[in-house]
Image (cartoon, grey):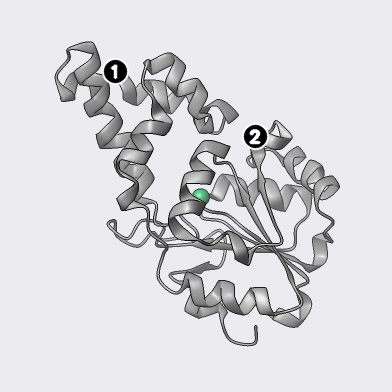
């Protein structure tokens, strides 16, 4: 799937790529509606009905990933709530072996995420993956989400990489599209971002079900 000899830099997404998206799905679809319902005196179904369009309208915008934004508008301590169910944070199968190998190779390995620093900190604390990366970049530091082609130009100013020798692995097709628009040559998607949901059919990009598929030759 990938000729590692051609790759100098590996850009890795966090949620749904390295970490099981089940945590985030459960958090936003079940736990936040529950806490919102309690606070507003609503039924859980009524809370879900109110929240779904509000979440939908923010998709792909930086605010969607901003815990301060949601804490403000929902009047909930979102960072605190994430910590409450942090036991659900899990590394996807075979990710650690892959990261060990990538870290030992001469390649540069960067975690590049839309996650807010609050969520990122909690997840690194829980998973201990931090040591595998040459650097960790949150799109909040650059002020623009990964779904915009401009993001990659700003990223390049922060960490040097060549478009032709860089591999991006990300479960979001919108993010892969923006990276392709910018000119990153090697793009791979993830077909099983949430272990509790069925595998996704992905045709637009080569996709891995887990990281064993990328170990050969690394
Ligand atoms: Mg993701």
Image x and y of residue 25, in percent = 34, 43
The answer to whether 30 appears left or right of 166 in the picture is left
The answer to whether 74 appears left or right of 170 in the picture is left
- 139 lies above or below 36: below
Residue located 81% across and 65% down the image: 164
Image x and y of residue 11, in percent = 67, 59
Residue located 39% across and 51% down the image: 21
- 146 lies above or below 130: above
Image x and y of residue 52, in percent = 33, 26
Q: Where is the N terminus found, in terms of image quarters?
A: bottom right
The answer to whether 152 appears left or right of 214 in the picture is right
Residue at the extreme left: 43
- Determine if residue 87 is in view: yes
For disc 2, the marked residue is 140
Q: Nearer the viewer, residue 106 or 196?
A: 106
Label 2 crowd (10 A; few <14 / some 14-19 / many >=20): some
For disc 1, the marked residue is 50
Quadrant housing residue 39:
top left
Residue at the extreme top: 40
């Amino acid at each position: 799937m990938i000729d590692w000899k051609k790759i100098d830099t590996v850009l890795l997404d966090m949620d749904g790529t390295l970490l099981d998206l089940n945590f985030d799905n459960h958090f936003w679809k079940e736990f936040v509606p529950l806490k919102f319902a309690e606070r507003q005196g609503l039924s859980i179904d009524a809370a879900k009905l109110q929240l779904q369009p509000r979440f939908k309208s923010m998709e792909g915008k930086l605010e969607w990933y901003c815990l301060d934004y949601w804490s403000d508008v929902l009047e909930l301590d979102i960072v605190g709530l994430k910590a409450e169910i942090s036991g659900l944070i899990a590394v996807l199968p075979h990710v650690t072996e892959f990261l060990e190998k990538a870290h030992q190779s001469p390649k540069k390995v960067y975690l590049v995420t839309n996650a807010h620093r609050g969520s990122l900190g909690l997840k690194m604390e829980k998973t201990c993956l931090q040591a595998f990366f040459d650097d960790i970049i949150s799109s909040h530091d650059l002020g623009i989400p990964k779904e915009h082609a401009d993001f990659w130009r700003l990223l390049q100013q922060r960490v040097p990489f060549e478009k032709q020798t860089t591999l991006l692995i990300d479960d979001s097709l919108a993010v892969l599209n923006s990276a392709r628009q910018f000119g990153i040559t090697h793009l791979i998607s993830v077909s099983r971002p949430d272990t509790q949901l069925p595998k996704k059919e992905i045709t637009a990009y080569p996709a891995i079900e887990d990281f064993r598929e990328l170990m050969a030759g690394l």
